[in-house]
């Protein structure tokens, strides 16, 4: 019983919703690479590639949780997480995060040096650039730190193809462009928490009007960017229609947020963003496989 409780705590520690979304984008990278370059893709490769992205994403999340344990204990949204609540010791979390991160690089290197290098870049950007350097200093934290969000796609693609293509870079950039709308809409909902913890997220350091306009802009950019794939790869009308519909939904709620400036709308927009990324990547996979 105690073992199961421990497993549950560590599962919560890695932030599974975020990690599984990143893993899905990494798997998408592998599947698209297989179709685009005709590289071999075995069940073992798919399993190990998934494991590498999972361990890298989980390791990064745990290490940032370890570093942020002091501010997590202050914020109402996070003070019940495993480390601040005392369910997992800071030392054990640090060891777990480091082991997972190292294993992710080792497995990535089993594929090729490029996949391993990209994994290292993702870990450094998330843990060092975002968490250690920028999170407590500048609202640019998720802009520069958000680069790591696009790395799982590149790792998955490079693991199978041994190189990167314009399509792989587009898929990675799609995640990076998606991040501001996702994070800033949540930051509006939890603005008081960030203020209490003195974290300079954009909605904390600017007026609500400016923050919502910025979110509307990033949503517009995302909607337009999702169609720029036409410049780098052939896509079906199904993808174009799907991207237009998804972009319109996201942009519609962003505009609504800019008008009413309410936490309720910000929360709804935040809840939409993850399904948006999941669906558009699923459509991308179908586009190249069917």
Image (cartoon, grey):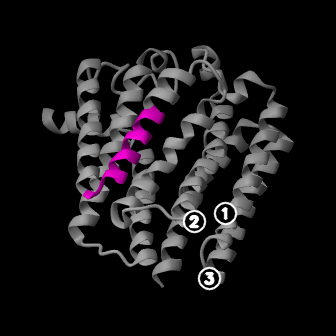
Mark positioned earlier in the residue sequence (2 or 1): 1
Residue 226 image label:
1
Asked if the residues shown at circle 2 and circle 3 are in contact, with their CB atoms under 8 angstroms apart, the answer is no
| Residue 86 x/y as whole percent | 30, 18
**Residue 31's x, y, as percent?**
40, 70
Say what secondary structure mark 1 lies in: loop
How many neighbours does mark 3 have within 10 angstroms: few (below 14), some (14-19), or many (20 or more)? Answer: some
- In the image, taking residue 181 as reference, residue 91 lies left or right, namely left
* Magenta segment boundaries in residue numbering: 111-126
Marks 2 and 3, the one that precedes in the sequence? 3
Towards the viewer: 61 or 249: 61
Mark number, residue 51: none
Residue 107 picture location, percent across and down: 24, 50
Residue at the spot 45% in from the left edge and 17% down from the top edge: 73
Marks 2 & 1, CB-CB < 8 Å contact: yes
* Residue 169 placement: quadrant: bottom right
Q: Which residue is mark 3?
A: 236
Residue occupied by mark 2 = 280
Asked if the residue at tag 3 contacts the one at tag 1, i.e. Cβ–Cβ closer than 8 Å, the answer is: no
């Amino acid at each position: 019983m105690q073992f199961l409780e421990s497993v549950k705590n560590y599962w919560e520690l890695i932030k599974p919703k975020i990690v599984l979304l990143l893993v899905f984008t990494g798997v998408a990278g592998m599947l698209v690479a297989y179709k685009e370059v005709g590289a071999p893709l075995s069940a073992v490769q798919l399993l190990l590639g998934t494991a590498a992205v999972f361990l890298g994403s989980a390791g990064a999340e745990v290490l940032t949780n370890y570093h942020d344990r002091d501010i997590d204990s202050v914020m109402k949204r996070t003070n019940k997480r495993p480390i601040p609540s005392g369910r997992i010791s800071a030392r054990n979390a640090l060891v777990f995060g480091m082991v997972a991160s190292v294993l992710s690089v080792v497995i990535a290197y089993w594929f090729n040096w490029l996949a391993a290098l990209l994994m290292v870049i993702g870990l450094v950007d998330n843990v060092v650039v975002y968490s250690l350097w920028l999170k407590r200093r500048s609202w640019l934290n998720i802009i520069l730190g958000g680069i790591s969000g696009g790395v799982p796609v590149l790792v998955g693609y490079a693991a199978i193809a041994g190189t990167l293509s314009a399509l792989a870079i587009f898929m990675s950039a799609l995640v990076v462009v998606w991040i501001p709308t996702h994070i800033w809409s949540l930051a509006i909902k939890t603005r008081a928490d960030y203020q209490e913890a003195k974290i300079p997220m954009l909605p904390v350091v600017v007026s609500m009007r400016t923050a919502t306009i910025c979110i509307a802009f990033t949503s517009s950019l995302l909607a337009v960017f999702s169609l720029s794939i036409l410049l780098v790869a052939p896509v079906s009308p199904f993808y174009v229609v799907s991207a237009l519909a998804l972009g319109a939904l996201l942009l519609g709620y962003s505009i609504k947020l800019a008008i009413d400036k309410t936490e309720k709308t910000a929360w709804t927009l935040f809840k939409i963003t993850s399904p948006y990324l999941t669906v558009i990547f699923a459509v991308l996979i179908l586009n190249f496989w069917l």
